[in-house]
Amino acid sequence: MNKEKKSGLLHRFYLYLKNKFDPTPPPKEEELYAVEICKKLIMNINSKLTNAPISFKRFIKNDENNMFIVINNRTITLINHVYSYNIFIEDDNNYSDICMLFDNEVEKRREEIETEIKNNIQHSLKEILRKVS
């Protein structure tokens, strides 16, 4: 058995023992609520999504619900005019899911803007061509 296979087997055995003797606790209810709030606001077309590439913070602003959310370092900060909550996301899957959903939605919106820009350029060039012909 080569070295790579041995290390792979040892890693799987380690994960098996870790899960058996140190099980991951189920997510807390407030964690699940915060994640669901984020998901709904991310998918809301009226939400403004911004990410900071240096600090890796993700921002959601929704004026119709008076909500402002910051996702950073496994923490979701929910803010409105009345309250502010900081919820630590312990569950790896919940945190990665919310980050991936946010990033995919930002990318989708970027692609829509890029398509609109390209269409405007093409329309403008067609008009110039029509005028010079």
Image (cartoon, helix red, strand yellow):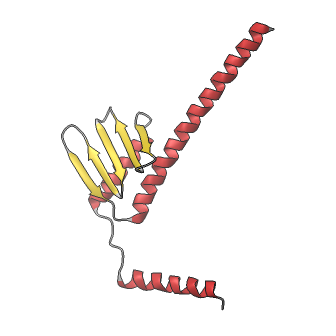
Res 80 → quadrant: top left
For residue 115, above or below residue 4: above
Extreme-front residue of the structure: 54
Check the picture and name the quadrant holding the N terminus.
bottom right
Q: What is the total number of numbered labels drawn onto the structure image? A: 0
Give how far across and how far down residue 3 sits, in percent.
Answer: 62, 87
79 vs 126: above or below: below
Give the left or right position of residue 129, taking residue 44 as reference: right
Residue found 65% across the figure and 25% down from its top? 119
Can you say which quadrant of the picture contains the C terminus? top right
Q: Residue at x 18, y 40 (%)?
A: 82
Vertical placement of 17 versus 114: above or below? below
Image point (37%, 48%), residue name: 38
Q: Residue furthest bottom?
A: 1
The residue shown at (78%, 8%) is 132
Q: Position of residue 130 (x, y in %)?
A: 76, 10
User: At which x and y percent is residue 110?
Assistant: 54, 37
Q: Quadrant of residue 118?
A: top right
Image quadrant of residue 27? bottom left
Q: Front-most of 72 and 31?
A: 72
Residue 8: x %, y % from top left: 57, 82
Q: Residue furthest right?
A: 133
Front in this rendered view, residue 16 or 54: 54
* Drawn side of residue 12 relative to residue 33, left or right: right
